[in-house]
Every structure is written in C-alpha cells, then in structure tokens.
Amino acid sequence: MEYSIGIDLGTTTVAAVLTGGGKNIFPAKSLLNFQYPEFGLDSVKRIQNGLDKNSVKKLQEKAVSTINALIDSYKNEIGFNYEDIKEIAVAGNTVMEMALCAYPLISLSKPPYRTSSEIFFPENTDSIPDFNIKDKKLFIFPVLDGFVGGDAIASIYYLDMAYRDKPAFIADFGTNVEIAVGCKDRIYTTSAPAGPAFEGGNIKYGMTASQGAVSDVRLKDGVFQIETISGSTPSGICGSGIMSLMYELLREGVINKDGRILPPEEIESESFTVVGKTEKKGENEIILYLDGKNNNNIKFFQEDVRQFQFAKSAVKSASEILLEKFKISEYEDFDVYISGTFGSRIRQDIIDLIDIFPFKRKNINVLDGSVLSGCLKYISAESPQRESDIKDIVRISKNFPLSGSGIFQKYFIRNLSFSP
C-alpha cells in the first residue's frame, strides 16, 4: 500500500495526517516543534535565529527532525516502510517554510518584511537534508507574500474559497493569525502579529494544548469549574482555556472593559472570591486552581490579561482593515470560520464578549485545523486538478501587510479595550 502524509508545520506545534491507498485516513498526530522553545516562542525570535545560511540550518534540522519523528510514529504504529510513502505535502507560515528549506530569513527581519524574491520550493525530499523519506514527491504550499505563507493558502484551498459565490472569512489562530476574506472573484489576506498568547506563550502559567492543560473554564457562584485535556491533573492553561477564562472574568465583572483586574470590593458579583493579591507587589491576581498537596497552583495575572489584550486587538484590528479593504459591510451575509490552536475546544458563546472580531455572528464555524485539513485535501486529490486549484488561489489573491501601517497602529490602540 502507498501512503501520503500531510504536515502542518506550525511555529509551536507540528501536526501530521496520513492516508493509505488513497482512501484510508489515519488519526492526526502532533508534536511540539523541536525548534521550541530553544529558538524562541514566536516567529520574530525564529527570524532572529535564522538570519544567515549557517544559523537557519539549525532551524532546518529541528524542523526536519520533528517531521521525521511524526513519520516514525506512524511507521511504528502501522508497520510500513519509508519506501511506501509516495509524497509529502507541507504547509506553514513563511518563516517555517523558509526555515525548512534553509533559506536565510534576513529579508523578513526588516521593512518591508517580505521575501527577497519569489520563492521556489524544492519538489523532492532529497533536496532537504536528513529527511527519512528519500527521493519522494514534496509539495510545499506556496508563500503568497510577506508573512502570509502556505498555511493560509492551505486553509483557503480547504474552504474552496476561490470557487465560492458568497464571501467567506477565516482566521487561523497561531503565533501569527492568518486572516483571509474572499470568494471566486478575489481573495484578500493579511497576517496579524498576535504573538504566542493564543498558544499559551508569554502567559505565566501558560502551556501548549497538551495533557494537563486547562482547556475550558466556567465560573459559577464564585467557584471555577475547569476542564483539562485528557482529564489530567491541571498543570497549566492553554489557548482555549485562556479564551474561556477571559470570557468568564468579563461576564462576571471581575475584569473591566479596560482589562483591569478589579479588587474584590469593586466586584458586584459573587465572583469577588477568585481575586487574590500577589505576594511581592500586592497586585490583584486571579486564583484559578490551588493544589495544596503538590503546590501546583495556576494563577492569572494582570500582565497575562495584557498579553491577551495585545493578541485580541491585533486580530480585531487586522480583521477590520481587511474587511474594509474588501469593502464588505458587517451586515452583509458572509460565512465565518475560525481555526488553529483552539480547534473544536473553543465555545462559540465566547467569541462576541471577548471582542476579538469587528462583527457579531450567531453562527461561527469552528474548524479543528484548517491547515492540516488543506494538506489532507491536497494529498487526497488528483493531479493536475489540485495544482490548478492552488494556482487559481494565488492568481486571485492579494496580501495587505500590516507592518509599519499607521492605520493598524491606530486601530490596535482603539481595540485594546473590550466591548461594554
């Protein structure tokens, strides 16, 4: 039996999906990117660690090692040989895809933050050192422009956006949040510099969406009710947990519209009990989980709230600009999708209150990994139609970089607060 594998090469997490015989689809697997955290938590740090040919090779080695580990996991589980894999499709942001190919990242480190020229990706695994899969087809989703890479193209491809009559909007959450809006006539894209907060980065007790991560939070009668991935003992909080925690704190009036954690005496609900004081500075803190036995406590601090505000404002501001460029009213009918780090764990009732988009929608379609789904669609499709579909996307797409944009800075400051 021949196998094909799709890879979502994320800054924090790398995911894989395997097909066999063109019909069998094996459950997806994921690992932390081996670049993380040694080479930084976000794309900015990765760029700084890959400016020249020598340094970027270290990033390449880690990326290839992560992909090899995922392939080996399938190999050990199913029992195939490396020779049985006929092709690999990879999608990642511009930084990740360039690093995989050991292309220096210097052009992304300074204005106008774009690739130095049109990127031509290798089409055979032998072009990339140390791949366990030798002399097989390699497809890397094309970079559109700047920080909008193959991951955005994969999501657009998965949604058939280039062939829709009605516009669709998608935000793929990660360290950078790729945003696209479009239909069969045109597709506009941008990348919001959200930082790692949506993946638990730069949060004191944050962690990736792995075993033991708090993935959902409820606050009732002044008591937190939490869910963790795999039902394990809480060891930190991941992106979906942070989103739901912020929702509950705003709903209960523990945090005001400016993002300030209120002191207990200013909180009108029974949830004043979740607020404590930090030991050193006496600042307000949220006591999410206390483990008296092992002292494995989880708290949420004012700086954590700020990191979330920076991330949500970046997404809302970028979305607002892109929708204005597309000339689409918030009252028009268009489909909305969110994907990425939250996957199916995010509750739909959260989206409006945390004020992350410049529109209100009753029905938001939550996808469990549109990038990996795009890779799966590609390796399951036939040539030359799949290549033609990708070319159509690139042909009608236009990117709007936000770096150095005065409008973005203006919107970003305005959107730091939450809707009353």
Image (cartoon, rainbow, N blue to C red):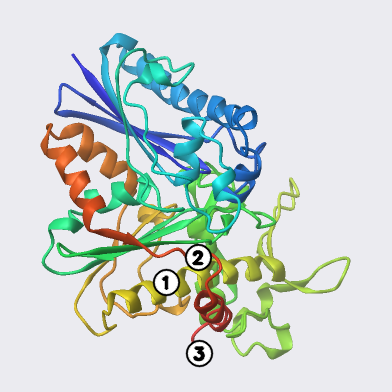
- Residue 1 location (% of width, % of height): 18, 13
Residue identified by numbered label 1:
350
CA neighbours of label 2 inside 10 A, class few (<14), some (14 to 19), many (20+): many
Residue identified by numbered label 2:
243
Res. 83 image quadrant: top left
CA neighbours of label 3 inside 10 A, class few (<14), some (14 to 19), many (20+): few
Residue identified by numbered label 3:
420
| Relative height, residue 241 to residue 109 (above, below) | below
Callout 1 amino acid: Ile
- Identify the secondary structure beneath mark 1: helix
Q: Do the residues labelled 3 and 2 touch (CB within 8 Å)?
A: no
Q: Could you tell me if residue 219 is visible in this image?
A: no
Callout 3 amino acid: Pro
Q: Could you tell me if residue 262 is visible in this image?
A: yes
* 200 left or right of 149 in image: right
- Residue 214 location (% of width, % of height): 54, 54
Distance of mark 2 from mark 1, alpha carbons?
7 Å
